């Protein structure tokens, strides 16, 4: 599904840069993961496989479970114990098989890779070819069709989204500086720990990129700012605005990738500030 790209006049004035927002949180399950899942489902169906699986910090699981439900596929998920309870409740609505890993996300990836290989399940984990990147590539193409930004800022965990967006831009002849936002030690944005980078090998193809690490306090500040402007995205995604502030640039054209709707999950919004 194509998503809108809009210019925020308020953010443009406030931060002395032309600020564009790519609204990736309006997909059916609320994040850009639906673009990746669409590619996965097409491949699964063309290969006549009926079992699919992945490890996830949450949004990829929601998307895969939802699409598997629609297409009548068996969905296998490997989740970590720290997944938010509302995310889990939503995932469970689509009745996937769930395995909770004792360790962290990287352990979940390893365990699931082994299991899926042995049990002939289509492996939809990041780092397995270009399928996921090809979904995210569309974001870059759509951006290039409307603007020519100097900077793109995206949240990063595996780097799949980050690389995919760049790939699309690059195909269209654009080469903006790519900024990745991570939160290695934070608690409010666990889906961008940026420690795993299971797609890292591809990042070396990007000519000019930089990763900026942010803490919870900074991310919550930007989350609140975006929320008040009507952009209700997960803290993981609001990190892109915080990364912009850290960059200290002026008079540039910047596009923030806003993914993952927060309106799906209100329990953990106790951190809301006035
Ligand atoms: C909200 C959000 N932003 C960004 C990412 C990072 O995606 P990637 O693993 O492609 O770097 C994720 C991954 O789960 C996510 O949920």
Image: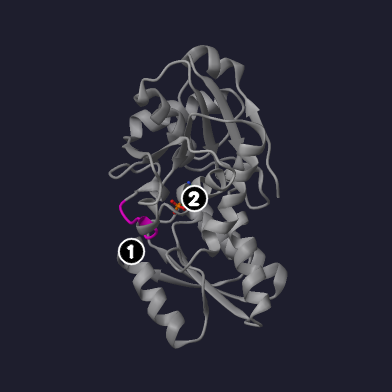
Residue 267's spot in the image, x, y percent?
51, 43
> In the rendered image, which residue does mark 2 sit on?
161
Considering every residue shown, the one lying at the far left of the view is 185
Q: Circle 1 is placed at which residue position?
A: 106
Q: Residue at x 43, y 56 (%)?
A: 83
Neighbour tally class for label 2: few under 14, some 14-19, many 20 plus, Cα within 10 Å: many
Q: Is residue 226 magenta?
A: no
Helix, strand or loop for disc 2:
helix
Q: Residue 24: x and y, percent?
A: 60, 43
Quadrant in the rendering for residue 66? bottom right
| Residue at 52 percent of width and 33 percent of height | 256
Q: Is label 2's Cβ within 8 Å of ligand 1?
A: yes
Q: Is residue 147 left or right of residue 249?
A: right
Scheme by which the image is coloured: one colour
Residue positioned 59% across, 23% down in the render: 229
Q: Is residue 196 magenta?
A: yes
- Compared with 217, 97 (above or below) is below
Instruction: Report the residue that reaches farthest toward the front.
Output: 173
Query: Is residue 120 placed above or below 55 in the rendered structure?
Result: below
The quarter of the picture where residue 187 lies is: top left
Q: Nearer the viewer, residue 264 or 155?
A: 155
Q: What secondary structure is the magenta-colored segment mainly?
A: loop
Name the side, left or right, on which 141 lies relative to 202: right
């Amino acid at each position: 599904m194509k998503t809108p790209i809009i210019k925020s006049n308020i953010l443009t004035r406030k931060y002395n840069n032309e600020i564009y927002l790519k609204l990736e949180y309006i997909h059916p399950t609320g994040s850009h993961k639906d673009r990746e899942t669409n590619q996965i489902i097409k491949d699964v169906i063309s290969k006549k496989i009926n079992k699919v699986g992945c490890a996830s910090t949450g949004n990829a699981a929601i998307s895969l479970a939802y699409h598997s439900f629609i297409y009548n596929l068996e969905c296998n998920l490997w989740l970590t114990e720290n997944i938010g309870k509302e995310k889990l409740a939503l995932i469970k609505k689509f009745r996937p098989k769930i395995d909770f890993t004792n360790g962290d996300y990287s352990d979940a990836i390893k365990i699931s890779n082994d299991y899926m290989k042995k049990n002939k399940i289509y492996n939809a984990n990041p780092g397995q070819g270009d399928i996921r990147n090809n979904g995210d590539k569309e974001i870059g193409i759509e951006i290039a069709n409307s603007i020519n930004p100097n900077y793109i800022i995206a949240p990063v965990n595996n780097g799949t989204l980050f690389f995919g967006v760049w790939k699309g831009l690059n195909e269209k002849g654009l080469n903006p500086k790519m900024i990745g936002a991570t939160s290695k030690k934070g608690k409010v944005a666990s889906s961008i720990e940026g420690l795993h980078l299971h797609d890292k090998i591809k990042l070396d193809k990007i000519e000019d990129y930089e990763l900026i690490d942010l803490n919870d306090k900074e991310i919550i500040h930007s989350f609140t700012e975006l929320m008040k402007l009507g952009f209700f995205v997960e803290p993981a995604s609001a990190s892109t605005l915080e990364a912009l502030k850290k960059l200290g640039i002026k008079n540039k054209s910047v596009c923030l990738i806003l993914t993952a709707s927060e309106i799906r999950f209100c329990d953990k919004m106790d951190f809301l500030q006035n």
